[in-house]
Amino acid sequence: MTDKPPTKIRVRGLRKAFGAKRVLEGLDLDVGAGESLVVIGGSGTGKSVLIKCILGLLKADGGSIQVDGEEVIGIDTDQREEINRKFGMLFQGSALFDSLPVWENVAFGLLAGKGLHRKLAREKAIEKLAQVGLDSDVATLSPSELSGGMQKRVALARAIATEPDIILFDEPTTGLDPIMADVINNLIIKITRDMGATALTITHDMASARKIAHRIAMLYEGKIIWVGPVSEITRSGDERVDQFIHGRAEGPIRMAVRA
Amino acid sequence: MPMRPLQLVGSFVLTFLESTGRLVLFAVAAIGHCVRPPFYWRSFGRQLIEIGYYSLPVVGLTAIFTGMVLALQSYTGFARFSAESAIATVVVVSITRELGPVLAGLMVAGRIGASMAAEIGTMRVTEQLDALTTLSTNPMKYLVAPRLVAGVLTLPLLVLIADIIGVFGGYLVAVYKLGFNPATYLQNTFEAVKVEDVTSGLVKASVFGFIITLMGCYNGYTSRGGAQGVGAATTNAVVSASILILCFDYILTELFFAR
């Protein structure tokens, strides 16, 4: 019998609304230490809201989020800064700082957060860039000089530069061609495995989800409606999951389309 | 419906009070971050150069032409009463008390307020501010505090230089166009100017520096909705800073000179 890994992130009854629109309605989710969990769901179902609530970028209306057993809803700014040191985050649009060269983007957490000397931080940044398959020549370029795929890799290098325990990926393959998307998927698998990090990814790219996940959870109407190992998703027994993973317009999930 | 006009007035007052409250809370938080470590010296140095050094040409040109026009206009007016000798006094007092700080403030509001709102607004809509938070860096501390302090310290220096250039502009017109004796003009200038004329202008400049950077940062920080939101933030930053500069100019003049 194998021991179940300790829970790294525990979400219970999470609620979040924007005005009258209720996005998350009592969401429950567990992410085990060292596991890669992918949350799938249609556009506008609240996947990004879930990640932003975990990071404290959005204030949850209710419920509980625990990171390593510590409640993070309602904590003050200093505690939040401390908790966020455990996280690395890859944003959907990369969110690189345009005013800084690539290496300073990668080393930002080391310079501002950990106060590392600039020379050492630069060496570390180049090392991380190499880990995501980028040459040291890229280090002095501005983010605007890079292609979308390269920006994504730089953002990935920034997310892992401080060697966080937990890495969050927000639509890591959106906007990339299939080959570059697979390169990013491989990097995510390699990096999280090498670092032993816990990964929480949100995506609607099923190819990516199948490749990088240990478990998949599906978010629909503000709740997790199914969660299980990636190998079992085709046998979920839930019509909504089947419709989503096969990308069918017909089924119980109705998209809000207005003429 | 007899209540409708009252409802409109009430709604306007409530919106105004809400916006003012938000701005005051933002300003209080920003001031708090200015005095609490960590301090981002590099970011502060960059702002000193951006606000101070790069604004010198535009402020200098504004000042020299203002001084020249002032001398010319005063001459055409005062010649009717044979009071041409008062030109030096009018130029130096007007420049140091009023025109130096106000015109420099308005020019810097156009240049710096707009650029701050656009930069921070773009960072907001491209998730760069969220990225800062995930890197355990408070955006208020990293982006807003250095700009505020740099604005408060740099504007008085710019205005001091503008005062000198403005008086020099008046001197050029008086001596080379109107045929004044250079030594007499300078003597009249030094006799007319008092320490409080200059210091009141410098205090005004400091307050204007705070207003410009606060409005630039606030409007950028709270911008929403993509390119249109950033555009609106930029316009609001310049317009609100310009109006506030003129309001506070009157208030400070009352405080300094009303007997």
Image (cartoon, coloured by chain):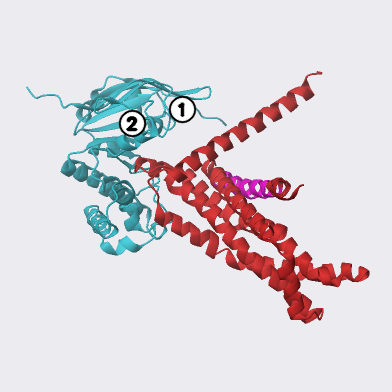
Chain colours: A cyan, B red
Tag 2: Cα neighbours inside 10 Å, few (<14), some, or many (≥20)? many
Q: Which mark is residue B241?
A: none
Q: Nearer the viewer, residue A156 or B147?
A: B147
Whichever of callouts 2 and 1 sits on the residue coming sooner in the sequence is 2
Q: Which residues are magenta?
A: B227-246
Residue drawn at x 73%, y 66% is B66
Q: Position of residue B110 (x, y in %)?
A: 63, 56
Q: Say whether marks 2 and 1 touch (CB < 8 Å).
A: no
Residue drawn at x 62%, y 35% is B20
Q: Position of residue A118 (x, y in %)?
A: 29, 58
Residue at the extreme left = A1
Q: Report the quarter where the N terminus of chain B lies.
A: top right
Quadrant of the rendered image containing residue B175: bottom right
Q: Position of residue B193 (x, y in %)?
A: 71, 64
**Against B120, is B81 above or below?**
below
- Residue that badge 1 annotates: A255
Q: Nearer the viewer, residue A6 or B190?
A: B190
Of the residues shown, which amino acid type is indicated by label 1? Met
Q: Nearer the viewer, residue B204 or B29?
A: B204
Left or right side of A198 for A218: right
Main SS, magenta region, reads helix
**Against B196, is A185 above or below?**
above
Query: Which subunit holds the residue at mark 2?
Result: A
Instruction: Measure the C-alpha gap from mark 2 to mark 1.
Output: 15 Å
Left or right side of B3 for B204: left
Q: Which mark is residue A40?
A: 2
